[in-house]
Amino acid sequence: MTRLRHLVWMLIAAGTLVLSTSQGFAQGRPDADEPGLVADDSYELDPEWQKQVVYYRSNEAPGTIIVATAERHLYLVQGNGRALRYGIGVGREGFQWQGLVTITRKAEWPDWVPPPEMIARQPYLPRFMAGGPGNPLGARAMYLGTTVYRIHGTNRPDTIGTAVSSGCFRLVNNDVADLYNRVPVGTKVIIRQKPEL
């Protein structure tokens, strides 16, 4: 009987922990990362954020990625005045950046190890999460230079078109898998905060 009572108390404690954690996420943690949440595949993106071929003037070589933070779009230059345009989620205020980097590594269903800076801001985050559908990095990740930032998938498709991340660029899983298959390691990535004039 004592063992059964002990087991019941352990289950109640675990349930309370899960409930309090999920309530914390529901109240809107700043990074909108929800470890363990599996994306709702029925979620339909607004047409503005859906992948499409668009007219796009650029002097950059085909295969270059241009991240337009202010527009919430990522462009893969195709040449002949066209680009593939993807809707993205970007860094929230104070976490946006710009620069020129290359893709230094690619991973399918990547493990997630939040950097120390993120743990300091959000101590409730796990220190490690194996790759999979409940992982906030989603189906694919492309690592940007020597930074802690990535272009990656997400288990929160509702965050596409918003500014909620800690500096990474997120796409829905189908789009990030499509982009991943189109670009090799070494791809040039230009991050712009302001639109070109």
Image: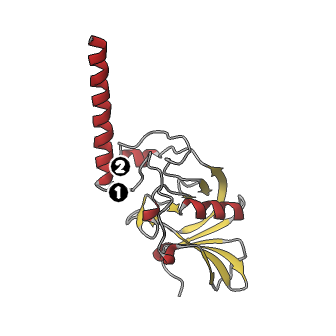
Q: Amino acid at mark 2?
A: Arg
The residue closer to the viewer here, 179 or 60, is 179
User: Residue at position x 45%, y 70% from top?
Assistant: 161
Determine if residue 49 is in view: yes
User: Residue at position x 67%, y 67% from top?
Assistant: 188
- Residue 3 falls left or right of residue 81: left
Instruction: Say few, some or many: other residues with alpha carbon within 10 Å of mark 1 (under 14 / 14 to 19 / 20 or more).
Output: some
Which of the two marks, 1 or 2, is nearer to us in this view?
A: 1
- Point out which mark residue 30 bears: 1
- Residue 34 falls left or right of residue 24: right
Tag 2 or tag 1, which sits nearer the N-term?
A: 1
Residue 74: x and y in percent read: 57, 71
Q: Amino acid at mark 1?
A: Pro
Residue at the spot of label 2: 121
Q: Are marks 1 and 2 in contact (CB under 8 Å)?
A: yes
User: Residue at position x 50%, y 41% from top?
Assistant: 129
Determine if residue 183 is in view: no
Where 179 falls versus 143 (above or below)?
below
Specify the quadrant that holds the N terminus.
top left
The residue closer to the viewer here, 6 or 75, is 6
The residue closer to the viewer here, 33 or 52, is 52
